[in-house]
Each structure stands twice: as C-alpha cells, then as structure tokens.
Image: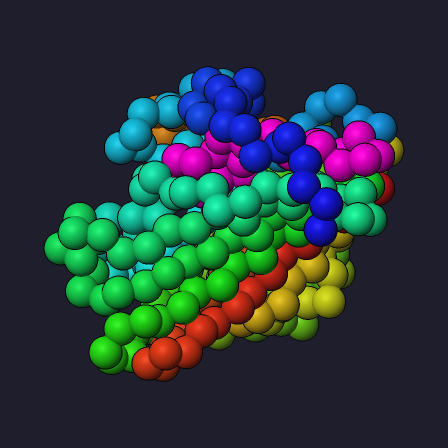
Amino acid sequence: MASANAAALVPLPAGGGTPGVILESADGARAEVALHGGQVVSWMPAGERESRLFMSSRATFASDKAIRGGIPVSFPQFADQGPLPGHGFARVSPWTLARAERTDAGAAFALLRLADSAESLQLWPYPFVVELGVTVSGRELQVAVTIANPGATAFPFTGALHTYLRVADTAEVTLTGLQSARYRDKVLGQDKLVESATELRIDRPLDRVYYAVPEAIVVREPGRSISVHASGFCDTVIWNPGEEGNAKLADLEHEGWRRMVCVEAAVARAPTTVPLHGRWQGMQKLVAA
C-alpha cells in the first residue's frame, strides 16, 4: 500500500463538521467517514459530484446522537431486539482512525476501530474489537466489518450496516433480487412470508427482514441504479418509514422518505455467536451505474 495524505482528520462537509477522514481515489471517487459512529456519511463515485448516500438535512451531529443518513453501524444489537438502546451503541461511540492510505492500484482506504470501554462494559459485558474497512474506487464503495472476541467467553450479537441510499423519488424506484426470499414484515407483524414480486416498489411503509443475502439487489430509478452486494451477513433489511413514519422522526426532513431507501446487510433474524478468541467478518459493496 502506498500512503497518502488522507490520514489527516478534518471537519467533514457532509457530516455537519464532525471530525473524520476524506478519502479520494486516484480516479476521483470520494468518501467521507466520520469518527462519530465509524460512519460513512458521503460517497461520490468517480465522475459524480453528488453523494449517492442519503443524509437528512435535519441530521443531528451531537456526540450522543445517531446520524440520520449515510451508513450507520448497528452493533451489538439490531433495532430493538434486546435490552440496549436501539441499534446498539457503536453508532453513537467515538471510533479511532487506525490508518488511511491509497493503494498501489489507486483506491482510497481507511481502517477505523472501536473497542470495549468502561462505558460499553456497563451496557454489554463483553470485551470486543470492531474494525471497519472502507474502500472507495471508481464506481464502487466497499465497507467490511470484522468483529473480534478477545475476552474469556463467547458472545452473541446482532447488527447491520444501515445503508441509506439517496434516490430522486421513491415513486419511481424498484428493487430486484428478492423474489422468492422468505421475510418478516415488521409493519404487518407477520413472519414467514414469501416475496412474490419480481420488482419491489416503495408504495407503502416498509420494514422487512429478508432471510437471504442475494447475489445482488439492484435499486433502479430513471437514468441510474445501484447494485448492493453482501457477504458474511445472513439477512437483508429493506426499510422506508413512509409518510406517517417520517412524521414521527424529528431528525428526518419533511418528505425525506421520498428521497431514500435503506438496503441493509444484517444479522437480524437471530444472533450470531463470536467464539472465544474468534472473529466474524461481513462485507457490503455498492456499485453505481
């Protein structure tokens, strides 16, 4: 790897001035990664000047608040599936930047790290180390997660990369790749449903946990698309709050639901266990077209 000047921490334009690192590949692809939450807050593929990730204009960048947009990291709890605050504590914790560099092939890369602390151990009694590797190049953004267990006992976790994709209008968006997958519909309170649609449309509030990780989920809208690929994770979450749900979220702008859809690589249906001195790895890759 060839080092670059990207390691300098700067106030992030897309992150409300919160400190982080700006990654820029040799071909001009760009990403902003905040230390708060270890969160990617912006991604511009090469040749584009607007982020493909949604960021609410009402997002809060306080140290004790989650950032509404980008790619929040949910760990060690997904949503409200446990005793911890919603989506766990990783997304509101201060991460450290281990390194940032440019590879010999011209990609920009950053490695962020979060480890247990006195505060985390009061909430969740397990030592851990989470590493987040962010790589940007060309038309691709890759986010890789490694969870290590240095403690004396195995621990279970659930979590997700809660990816917010920016779209022009959800009324014109379709998602493909989920047909025939079983899922839990959290809006309807029903489980063991089977997706029959060849194209999923955002024509109602959606909060679904699909028990599958397709080779690719393609989010299409007029003139462009994003392919979402994942490995290591066992589930896929599709979320959009709809108009009524939007109104209940103070940090989501008016009609923000029309401009975003979440496609999340997740461990959500049941916990995964990281054995003593073991590790778990998962990855999500976004490809813009």
Residue 222 visible in this rendered orientation of the protein: no
Q: Give the image quarter of residue 228.
A: bottom right
* Residue visible at 25% across and 61% down in the picture: 82
Please provide percent x and percent y for residue 204: 54, 43
* Residue visible at 37% across and 24% down in the picture: 60
Residue 131 within the magenta-colored segment of the rendering: no
Q: Give the image quarter of residue 265.
A: bottom right
144 left or right, relative to 117? right
* Residue visible at 50% across and 28% down in the picture: 9
Please provide percent x and percent y for residue 217: 71, 57
Q: Nearer the viewer, residue 274 or 258?
A: 274
* Residue visible at 72% across and 45% down in the picture: 2
Please provide percent x and percent y for residue 227: 75, 51
261 left or right, relative to 26? left
Tell me, what colour scheme is on the image?
rainbow
Residue lying farthest to the front in this orientation: 2
Q: In this view, does 88 lie above or below 277?
A: above
- Magenta segment: 20-42
Q: In this view, does 96 lie above or below 53?
A: below
Residue lying farthest to the left in this orientation: 122
The quadrant of the image that shows the C terminus is: top right
Please provide percent x and percent y for residue 117: 22, 52
Residue 259 visible in this rendered orientation of the protein: yes
85 left or right, relative to 67? left
193 left or right, relative to 45? left
